Image (tube, helix red, strand yellow):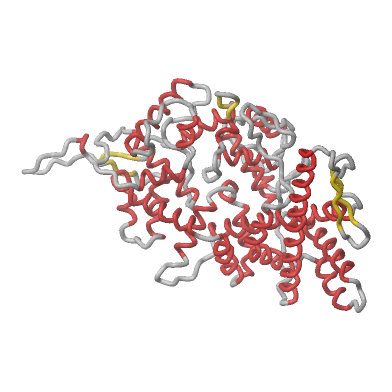
Amino acid sequence: MGRHPMQGETVALFSQMKVNFTEGLDHFRQTIFAAQTALHAPPDEILFNNLSALAQDFDIARSNGIFDPLPEEAPRESHDASRTRTIRSRLACLGYLRLDSRLPIIDPLLIHAIKKFQHDAGLTEDGWVGRQTWQALQELVGFESPLHINRWFAGNFPNSALQRAIALRLHVLGLTDTPAFDDPDKLDAGLHRLQAVTAFLHLSAQDIKPEICPATIALLFDQDLLVQGLAAELSPLPEDGDHPLFSFAASLAKVELWLAGYDVAPDGYQGKEFFKRTPIRRRGRQRMPLGQQPLLLSDDAKLFTALTTYWQDHGKEGESPGLAQRFAGEFPLFFRMIDAALRARNSLPESEKSAMIYHVVAKQPEQLEAIWQTALSLDDQIWDGMGRVFGWLHNLTRRPDGKEIVIGRNISRLVYHQAMTGYDIARQALQAFPAQLDNIFQRELQGSDPHHIMMCHDRDLDFKVFINGRGDQEKINQFIDQVTLTSRSFAATCRIIGVFVSTLSLFISQGRTGWAGLILTLLQLSDRISSLGRQLPAVPNFPTTPGANVLPRT
C-alpha cells in the first residue's frame, strides 16, 4: 500500500492537537454563576442566556476537535482526522481510490472519489460527506449497519455502488482472492463458493442462487446470521481442505475479531493461514495420508495472534495457542462465543448500556484525555462494531473473578461513540430550538390557509383552530399531521435541552467542570437523549420508491 510523502508530517500535526479536559464550558459556567448572583433576572432571560452560552461552547468543542459531527454543508476543511481517514479507507476498499494514503485531509483525489461514489449510489454529487453519504458508506462497507436492499436497486438491477460492495464483501469473507470489481468470472466463482458454504451451513430454507439477487445479497450482508451458521453443530466437517468453508470461517473470524477491537484486519483469506503438518512415519504405525491430516492455523498469521489473545481474554490462557492452531477443526466453539455476546447485546436495554459506560468513566474521569487519544487513533473501528463491544463489556462486567475493568481500546471506542452521538443530538436540538420557537410564536402557524384550515393564537398563547367547511379535506389532514409532527418535535427539543441543561448545571455545581463535565453529562443522558432525538426534525433519507435514485441533499 502506497504512502504519501507528506503523510507522516500531516499525521504528526493532528496527533499534536491535545485538549485539557478540565478546561472548557467557559461561557456556560459564567451564565450559571451570573444567574446565581442575579436577584431579579426573569427566568426566560436566564434560560436564553444559558442556551446562547451553551451553543457557543458546543461550537468551541467542535473547533477544538473534541467532537466533530458530520457537516451540514460543504466544509472548507476537516479537523476530524479519524472520520476523514475512514472515508478515504472505505472508498479505497470499494475501488474508488487506487490506494489508501491514510491522509486525514480533504484533497482533490478524495473529492473526486466521493463524487464518483455518490453518482453510483444515486446521491447528489457534491463531493463532500454529509449524513446521507456517510450512511451509504456505513451500509455498504460496515458490518453492523443493516443493508436496506431496495434502496440500492434501480428497477431490477443493483446500482454500481452495491455491485462494488458485493465484490468487496465476497473478498472480505474469503470467497475471492481479490475484489472482483471488473472481473465477472471471478465474481461468479465467488458467488458459487458462497452457495456451497450456505448450503453446507443450511443458512436458508431455500437454496441460494449464485447470482446477484435480493435473497443472495440479504444473506451476504447479514453478519449476525453468518455467525449463527458457523456457531451451529457442524459434524462432520468437509474432508476436503480446499472447501470454501474453511477460508470463509477464517475470514469471518477476522471480521469478528476486528469488530471486537483485536489487532487483525478484515482483509479476506490470504491463502497462507492454514497448513497440514507433514506426517511422520513411525515404526509399527500406519502413516495417515496427507489428505486426511487436519488443517492447522499457522502461528505467524495475524489471525493466530488475535485468536490466542481472544482465548486468553476469555479465561483460557493455557489452552489459547492450541485452540488458535486447531481453529479449522474447532471454529464452531469460537463462533458460539461470538454468538453468545451478540445475544447478550440484543438483550441489553439501552438504559443499561448507557449506565455501564457512564459508571466505568465516572470512576476514572482523569482518563478522558487518554480515552480520546486512543479512540481517535482507531479510525474505522470507532464507526463499526459497537454492538459487539457492548456484548463484550456486558460479559466482562459479569466475570466471576471481579477484576476491575481496564480502560483500553474497546472502552475508549464506546465512550467516544456514545458521547459523540449524544453531542450530535443535543447540538441539533440547540440549533432547531430558535426556529421552532419562532414558528410557535407566529400569530398564524406556518401552513395556515383561510381556504382550508387556520391555526392562530392570541397574546396569551391561547390557540384557536378555524376549519373552512368547504375546504379540501386532504389539505386539512396534511396540515393537522404537520402540526402534530411539529409539536412533538418541539416537545422533544425542549425535553432534550431541559434535561441537558439541568444535568450539566448539577455536574458543574459538584465540581465536574470543563469538557469532562460535558462528556459525563452526555454519557449519563445518552439513552434519554437518543430516544428523544428520534423525534427531532428528520434528516432527508434515501429514496424509498423503487427506481428513485436522486436525493435532494447529501
Does residue 400 sit above or below 190 in this rendering? below
Q: Residue at x 63, y 26 (%)?
A: 547
Q: Residue at x 66, y 54 (%)?
A: 421
Does residue 401 sit above or below 252 in this rendering? below
Of residues 178 and 39, the one nearer the viewer is 39
Does residue 340 sit above or below 71 in this rendering? below
In which quadrant of the rendered view does residue 462 lie?
bottom right
Among all residues in the image, which is located at the extreme front?
A: 469
The percent position of residue 478, horizontal first and vertical second, equals 76, 42
In which quadrant of the rendered view does residue 533 lie?
bottom right
The percent position of residue 291, horizontal first and vertical second, equals 22, 34
The quarter in which the N terminus is drawn is: top right
The quarter in which the C terminus is drawn is: top right
Instruction: Indicate left or right for 459 with 23 as reference.
Output: right
Q: Residue at x 39, y 60 (%)?
A: 314
Instruction: Indicate left or right for 155 with 47 as reference.
Output: left
Q: Residue at x 10, y 40 (%)?
A: 286
Residue 256 in view (yes/no):
yes
